[in-house]
Image (cartoon, rainbow, N blue to C red):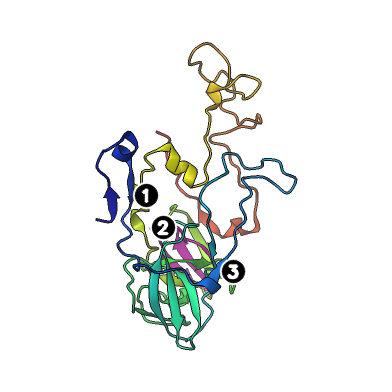
Amino acid sequence: MPVRKYKPTSPGRRQMIVSDFSVLTKKKKPKKSLLAKRKQNAGRSSSGKISVRHKGGGAKKRYRKIDFKQNKIGVKGEVESIEYDPIRSAYIMLVKYRDGERRYLLAPNKIKVGDKIVTAEKTTIKKGNRAKLANIPAGIPIYNIELEIGRGGQIVRSAGSCATISAKEGNWVTIKLPSSELRKVHKNCFASIGTVSNVEHGLIKIGKAGRKRWMGIRPTVRGSAMNPNDHPHGGGEGKAPIGIKKGPKTPWGKKALGVKTRRAKYSDKFIIKRRIKKRRK
């Protein structure tokens, strides 16, 4: 089973669905030299004011240094272990290269301990290998894609996600992202072959409030349950609707739902087709 359900011994257990973790390497501690401290700020800025709400507490976590660049060109590596990363939704793999160096990489789906991987301008189409977009055939699933040459993978890094190449023209490659957006990327940018691991991540159900607190997420109160001086949606008798002419607003009075928040960026010219907006249920 890719996910695990418990016997309904309590209301929380009845709803809970967790990852099975059967694909992970048993009793494997993270590589100490590839760990870093991660300071918890509880959503507060340098001045001590809350800039991101609903954050605080949670289990202590250590950051795993992930190699998104994979710039050891032509040096073969072997997968030593597949491990859990508390910071991200995808699993990670510890790779030992032929020269003795070890690095953490994003693990593709169905990769196993002992598998060989390599980064090269042109390589065999095999999960875990990394090559230039110009040398990857159309229709092959890819992840950890560079947007700028040499900068390292920036997009398609979350659990179960993958993109595909839909067209090639001149120096540009058109890729279809998981959001259905069509985007142009330079042909000399690198991408890894495969789908990001932990594809069942979307099936997980938290089950109980306490588990949310372990994750460092504090309670969220509905705006309609507040007073009018605390939120634009507050006040009224009973379950009053949002009594504002111009629709829903944030706690700070700015428009919400259906409002474009993306500012004009230099990279807008590379977007051929915007993502298809999902309808709210």
What's the residue type where badge 3 is placed? Glu
Q: Which mark is residue 157?
A: none
User: Which residue ends up furthest to the right in the rendered image?
Assistant: 47
What's the residue type where badge 2 is placed? Ala
User: Which residue ends up furthest to the top in the rendered image?
Assistant: 237
Label 1 near label 2: C-beta < 8 Å?
A: yes
Residue for point 46% across, 63% down: 175
Where 244 falls versus 50 (above or below)?
above
Residue for point 44% across, 68% down: 29
Residue under label 3, please give it.
148
Residue for point 52% across, 11% down: 237
Residue under label 2, please give it.
159
Residue 16 versus residue 88: which sits nearer the camera?
A: 16
Sequence order check, earlier mark of 2 and 1:
2
Q: Is residue 176 magenta?
A: yes
Q: Quadrant of the N terminus?
A: bottom left
Residue under label 1, please give it.
202
Residue 211 versus residue 143: which sits nearer the camera?
A: 211
Q: Position of residue 37 (x, y in %)?
A: 60, 62
Where 142 falls versus 266 (above or below)?
below
Where 18 falls versus 230 (above or below)?
below
